[in-house]
Amino acid sequence: MTPYDFVSDIMSTPFDKPTIESRLSVRGAKWHRDASDIIPLWLADPDYPLCPEIKQALRDAVEEEFTVYGSDTEARDSMSAKIKRVNKIDVPASQIMLTQGVTPGMWLAARHATRPGDEVIVTDPMYYPFVSQTQIAQTHTVRWNLDIDDGYKFDIEQLKSLISSKTKLIFVCNPHNPAGRVMTKEELKGIADLAVDNGIYVYVDELWEDIRNDGRKHISLASLNPEIADITISGWGFSKMWGVPGLQAGYLAATNKVIFESLTKHAYGVLRGTNNMGKAMAPVICSDKLDYWRNDMNKYLGEVRDLVTKRLTEMGDITVPNLEGTYLLFPRFNYGLTSAELNKVIFEEGRVSLGTGITFGPKADNHMRILTATSKKIMNEALDRIESIIPTLEKMAK
Ligand SMILES: Cc1ncc(COP(=O)(O)O)c(C=O)c1O
């Protein structure tokens, strides 16, 4: 007996359970933005059921009528213990801030580290809110290219060449959305050494820390040495692993007290942390009680990754990267078409909605982003549909 047996009545694993009908029968932006005959693989929102222990914590909070002004203490204590145990970073609860999802951390980091006219380094491709934050902060976005033909490797020599006296912040995303890479220790050390030597702040988003294939290890940047920890702001959250993005719960930490006080000042009166449901589930998620769910979900995601990789590679001229982490695959469609053109055919003729490459950076305009966190049944149906439009892409090829 596994602890989730009572959730999974007939299926052997809860991750295999979702069907198109079951997903359409519940609320949510992903399945209801478009017509009901579209399979939505555009948003990073898993189709999997809620882990029973999280559901119970939320039920308990409602039963208790935990809707009053809530204290952050229990959640922050559990986060401090988790950051020490999992991320190998020693940070007191008093230097952890609850945030409304992970996204506000990017804004806060830019507010702390930059002034208008400064330069901020982000990868190309990159999860687009990082770029928006550089624009909101009126800084110049400097692009660090990742190349699919190079396995989306983080080229440290290239990063070095991008640094100038105006560089004040490097945005790091690890595991990386949308490249699907889990950074190696050497890559992280390369970033850390350059940041420390040049006195550049780093904001590292580790939201995807739990989702890794083939037993890869996640290494937190701030765990490398005290020098990099001293200039790093780290952000984590629950949205992706635990399928709770609608509860908008995230947290950030800085081991440097002066930095943390500056973040607190910028946030004061503007950011109001997270809601009580987020606070109620935090101690459960931050404990080690849910390791069984994390392991089983990663195992299933690995199987879906293998299925998608094999089928996409065989169906057409598509370069498929090795998905090391996240459940977002970012292949290149080698038909000389822009991602808007690809999207039009895949959406209108194939009835599948994917993420367009251009959203993630100018260099990625012939890529599409595909969510893999669904059942094999739904994924196979989506792949059948994508396969059916390959002849159209061949006809349109430039
Ligand atoms: C790297 C990264 N950071 C932040 C977010 C947004 O997370 P949240 O909804 O918790 O703010 C996402 C969503 O996909 C993401 O991929």
Image: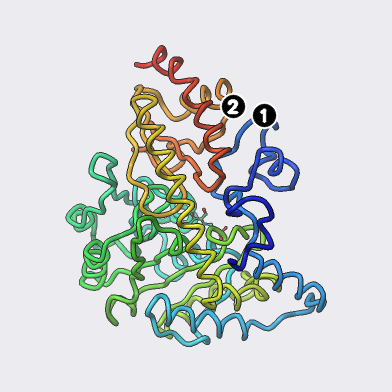
Q: Name the residue under label 1.
A: 37
Q: In which quarter of the image is the N terminus?
A: bottom right
The residue identified by callout 2 is 351
Question: Residue 35 sits in which quadrant?
Answer: top right
Q: The C terminus appears in which quarter of the rendering?
A: top left
Instruction: Report whether 5 appears left or right of 134.
Output: right
* Crowd around label 1: few <14 · some 14–19 · many ≥20 (10 Å): few
The Cα atoms of the two marked residues, 1 and 2, are separated by: 7 Å
Name the image quarter holding residue 187: bottom left
Residue contact at pointers 1 and 2, CB within 8 angstroms: yes
Mark 2, secondary structure of its residue: loop
Q: Is residue 133 above or below residue 283?
A: above
Query: Identity of the amino acid at label 1?
Result: Asp
The amino acid beneath tag 2 is Arg
Out of 27 and 104, give the one closest to the viewer.
Answer: 27
Q: Position of residue 95 (x, y in %)?
A: 49, 83
Is the CB of mark 2 within 8 Å of ligand 1?
no
Q: What element carries label 1?
A: loop
Is 96 on the left or on the right of 357, as rendered?
Answer: right
Foreground residue among 223 and 308 = 308
The answer to whether residue 107 is above or below residue 29 is below
State the residue at coordinates (51%, 76%).
288
